[in-house]
Amino acid sequence: MSHTRRPNRGPSAAAENRAALIAAARELFATDGYDAPLTSIARTAGVGQGSLYRHFPDRASLALAVFEEGVKELEALAAKPGTTLGEMLALMTEQAIASIAFVGMVGAPADPRIAHVRDRVARSLRDPLVRAREAGHVREYVTIEDLVTAVGMIAALLARIPAAERRETAQRAWLLLFTGMVSEPDAPSSPGRPDH
Amino acid sequence: MSHTRRPNRGPSAAAENRAALIAAARELFATDGYDAPLTSIARTAGVGQGSLYRHFPDRASLALAVFEEGVKELEALAAKPGTTLGEMLALMTEQAIASIAFVGMVGAPADPRIAHVRDRVARSLRDPLVRAREAGHVREYVTIEDLVTAVGMIAALLARIPAAERRETAQRAWLLLFTGMVSEPDAPSSPGRPDH
DNA sequence: TAAAATCCGGACAATATAGTCCGGTTGCTA
DNA sequence: TAGCAACCGGACTATATTGTCCGGATTTTA
């Protein structure tokens, strides 16, 4: 008949379980990295294994849910006309500090859905980069890929140090990446392959 | 009596086993990263589990043996009076490309012995950095820690991408780190913490 | 209130890896 | 050549993590 099957909600509201799982995942991704045991995430969320795997069949699904919010923020910021490249990178760095699993997204993504998220991030950087270039705030040769690479480098670095040092380290790393290390940009003794 | 107990060597020469293990470890560290299964390393070396654990009680011992050679190269290069900072960084990058487990050494070392190796690397960078600074080749504010951080960033990045892309990516990353991204080093819109 | 649909949670099996142990083998000594 | 000492290799145990499954609790429907 037409009394279509109702979305029967269980004893303690499926949506709340889902939210608790996402919150726990964000927390443990930040503490232990992208490889945090799913068991721990379920336990932290106060939820059974079954519920975890019902809501999120695999690790990538969970990560996607965690990051979705952050990516939306990024896209919203990019959509504002006045947004500068520095603001975009600042937000991305904040997110990397908050969840070092961020590196799993900007690095080399194994899962196609994560690759798609990475592309969304790259796309949202396009306009701010163009504006920065036109305004002469950024060197000509810097590409979107460079920006993603730079964030990926910093995120990968942050993932390897204690949480307490991450903000300071991130700022120092950005200083180096922004201003560079050499005094004469035109003729650096760039470390390519050594002639051995 | 005085016929002291001889260092009895086993059936097929313990030293050869040891060398085979180091070679296998170097290979698998480069392919699969620092977390490569010790079981696989033993199998690749054509050696039993027992021999692996007899020679190297834990993962850090094995890594130390693998890196020792590279660190000696580094120190030897640093000892030559004419060595430039760029040459040092080039060699370190080569080593990071060859063995992405390098990141385990320059990152946040859990094992004190690995921390010691890290210190040796840092120490060997000192004189070349001083020379580069005196020659005006490098910005005043760049420290040894910055150099180690930079190598660590690049190594961590390389660990996350396919081996075939590592050399090219490393060169691009060094370009960014050396010359910087912004056009006006004095007033960059540095991404610190956003004012949220 | 009784039946049905649905969801919860933890026990359970499967798998991968670390680390141990011991029978067998080889080379050295006398 | 006989005996001994050290070493080899792989089987074995312990442990951690993933992913599945099912009894039971809860809400809705009639």
Image (cartoon, coloured by chain):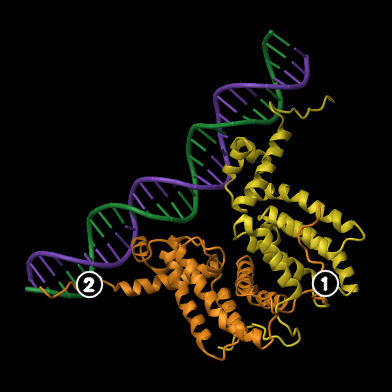
Chain colours: A yellow, B orange, C green, D purple
Badge 2: how crowded within 10 Å, few (<14), some, or many (20+)? Answer: few
Which of discs 2 and 1 lies nearer the camera? The answer is: 1
Local secondary structure at mark 2: loop
Q: Amino acid at mark 1?
A: Ala
Residue B72 located left or right of residue A182: left
Q: At label 2, which amino acid type do we have?
A: Asn
User: Mark 2, chain letter?
Assistant: B
Vertical position of residue A171 compared to residue B127: above or below? above
Q: Position of residue A83 (x, y in %)?
A: 88, 61
Q: Nearer the viewer, residue A92 or B124?
A: B124
- The image shows a total of numbered marks equal to 2
Label disc, if present, on residue B8 of the rendered structure:
2
- Which residue lies under the disc numbered 1? B187
Q: Can residue A116 be spotted in the picture? A: no
User: Which one is earlier in the sequence, the residue at label 2 or at label 1?
Assistant: 2
Choose top left, top right, bottom left or bottom right for residue A9.
Answer: top right
Q: Quadrant of the C terminus of chain A?
A: bottom right
Please, is residue B187 above or below residue B194 in the view? below
Q: Does dot 1 land on a helix, a strand or a loop? A: loop
Instruction: Point out residue A49 in the picture as x, y percentages from the top left corner.
Output: 59, 38
Q: Measuring from the top left, give residue A133's x and y in whole percent.
A: 87, 73
